[in-house]
Structures are given as structure tokens and as C-alpha cells.
Image: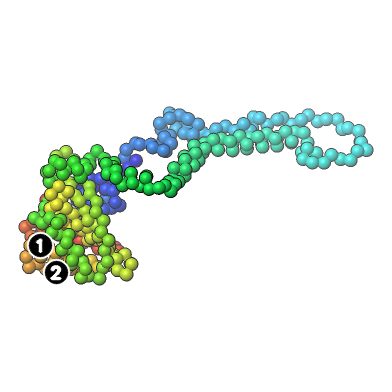
Amino acid sequence: MKKKICPYCDQAIKDGIYCKGCRRIVLKPVIWDVDYYLNERHPASETNCQYHGDLHTGKMTSPKSNASKSARPKAAAPRPQAAKSKRSPRKGIRAKLGLAGAIYLCIIIIGVGVNLFNHFAETSRDIGKLLNSMTEAKPEPESNGIWEEKFIEDDSWQPELSDWERSDQEVKEAGIPCNGYGHLNIRDSEVLPLFDTLLLETSFQADCTQYSYNQFIDETTWYNTTYEYVLVREEDYCGYVSLYFDTVDGRMHGMDLIFENKEDLYEMADLSINLLTELGVLEEPQTGRSLFDEALEKDPEGMERFQLEECLEISCMEMDGEYYMMYIGAKP
């Protein structure tokens, strides 16, 4: 099992080439190779069996067929010619092949059958698992609503966390904001209503999803609650904007803009700069599109972050004319 690790912040990359930890495009992640074999067969070097061959030489062998060449009968000795008979000649395969040929044909048929049996025996486990998964995937029968009520009322369920993750409840109870991200002196309670209002003045329709991830490595913590706005125009996907806040106190970390069309990114870049200006983070800034072009000219690969204000930085990237990305956020 391979795990991709960001070389900039050492966090696991879960979504393609984009690291949500440090919000960078990572084209060359560090690969951790861990030997876990869940439902897969073990590799050839770890055992000596009929599928993987000799443990020491690595030579691959396959199960021997019962119909080997050594099992082939010797040709029958010549027999004296029998006296002519008035009966009609014998018909069928035995008449055409003779006794020795018929025996040899039977051995071949038996050998093929043995090989087919071995093949089905080898794959029966996978077939059984497939049938079990199909059985488990059957929808629950309709009920009188008791099951649905129990599911809705049970709010104790939490997604399974990895060893480097913490739940929202844990970090909120501790009450200590993260130290891996920078923070702006504006909170989600004032940013989100203004962003929604400005969004109504654009040509986009938006659908917002909220989720969080709270990670730590040694003494460094990254607590992030994300509001992800997927933007469409007349039902055609355009891109998305993500707003990041500290899970503990709601202070803003920054925002990401990722679009397939440069003009769409320009429109949302202008909106983002207007948002930060109205909230008092920026004073008399340039337009969002001019900031994007300047940052892209300085660093087309988006590896560097340039300072906008004392507490604010920006990075931009263009990927083969297919994606345009802009990050604006607090300095760590």
C-alpha cells in the first residue's frame, strides 16, 4: 500500500496532486510504501507455494497436470492380422483411433478436467467474496421508519480517524487554536454572510459543502474547517472556492480558487479581494485579476508565495491552460 506525502508540510495527500494541508499543488510527492496485504495474495518472495514458486530461487512453477507426458501409454505391439469377417466394419471414435488412441484421448480429457478444477478452486474464494459483497449491498427492506429514526437520532457516530487526526470535539474541548497555519483577525461568522452576499452579484450559482480535518505531527497542529463552494453557470461546472477557518476559534486561514477558465477565475479573484477589503484586511489593494497575473508572471509553477500585506500572502498557478489556481491566506 502506497501513501503520498507532501514534501512541504509532511501531511498525507488524499486528493490527487493537491495538498489540503499546505494548499499547494504537489507534482512530485514523497511515496511511503507500506506492506499491507488486505484482500490481496501475498507476494512471491514471502512464501513457497504452488502459485509463487520456490522461496529461494524465485522460479515460478504451476501445478502439474495429471495428463503428463510420462502418463502417455506406449504404443501397442503389432497384432497378427485377424481373419476376414463377414460383419460390417466397426464405427465410431474407437474404430478410427484404435485402442491406444482412445486411451490417450481419455487421458487428455481427464487432464483438461483436472486443470479446469484447479482453476475454479483458485478463483472460488474471489467469487465467494463477490457474491457476499453483492448480498451485503442489497438495500434494506422498507420499514415503518423505526430504522431511519434510530439512525438520525444517533449522533454518536464519527468517521474513522487516522493516527495523525483529531475530531472536532477533541480540538474544541482542548480550546487551543492550531499553530501550523496563520490566522487573520476575521472569523467565519462575519466572512461567510458577506461572501454569500457578494456571490449573489456574480453570474454563478453555488452549492456549499462544509467539512473539517484536524491533523497533527509532534507539536505542530493543523485544524481546518472548510466551506467549499462549487460554482456552476447554467448547470455547467466552472470551478470552486474553498474558505478555510480554524476549527477551534473560527479565525480565517485563507481561501483557494480553482477554475477551468481564466475569466471565471478573474471574476472570483476580484470578489475575493473585495471581500478582504470590506472586512478591513486589505487597504486600497489592486484588483484580483492584476494580482493573479503578477504572481503568475513571477512564478508560473505556483511554488512561491508572495506577500500582499504584513499578514497576507498569495500564490498563483496555471496548469497547461486547463486549470487556473489562486491562493490567498494568512502568513504562518
Image location (x, y in percent) of residue 105: 70, 37
In the rendered image of this protein, does residue 20 appear above or below residue 34?
below
In the rendered image of this protein, does residue 164 appear above or below residue 321?
above
For the rendered model, the colour scheme is: rainbow
Report if residue 301 is visible in the image: no
Q: Nearer the viewer, residue 251 or 146?
A: 146
For numbered disc 1, what is the local secondary structure?
A: loop
Q: Is residue 207 left or right of residue 88?
A: left
Q: Nearer the viewer, residue 143 or 276?
A: 143
The alpha-carbon separation of the residues under discs 1 and 2 comes to 16 Å
Please state, as top left, top right, bottom left or bottom right, where the N terminus lies in the image: top left
Q: Is residue 139 left or right of residue 169?
A: right
Q: Nearer the viewer, residue 17 or 209?
A: 209
User: Crowding at label 1, few (<14), some or many (≥20) Cα neighbours within 10 Å?
Assistant: some
Q: Which mark is residue 17?
A: none
Point 64% across, 29% down: residue: 70
Q: Which mark is residue 287?
A: 2
Report if residue 205 is visible in the image: yes
Give the amino acid type for the residue marked by disc 1 in the picture: Leu
Residue 236, quarter of the rendered image? bottom left
Q: Is residue 226 left or right of residue 43?
A: left
Instruction: Tell me which label, 1 or 2, sits earlier in the chain.
Output: 1
Point 33% across, 67% down: residue: 235
Q: Closer to the camera: disc 1 or disc 2?
A: 1
Give the amino acid type for the residue marked by disc 2 in the picture: Thr
Instruction: Kindly identify which residue carries mark 1.
Output: 279
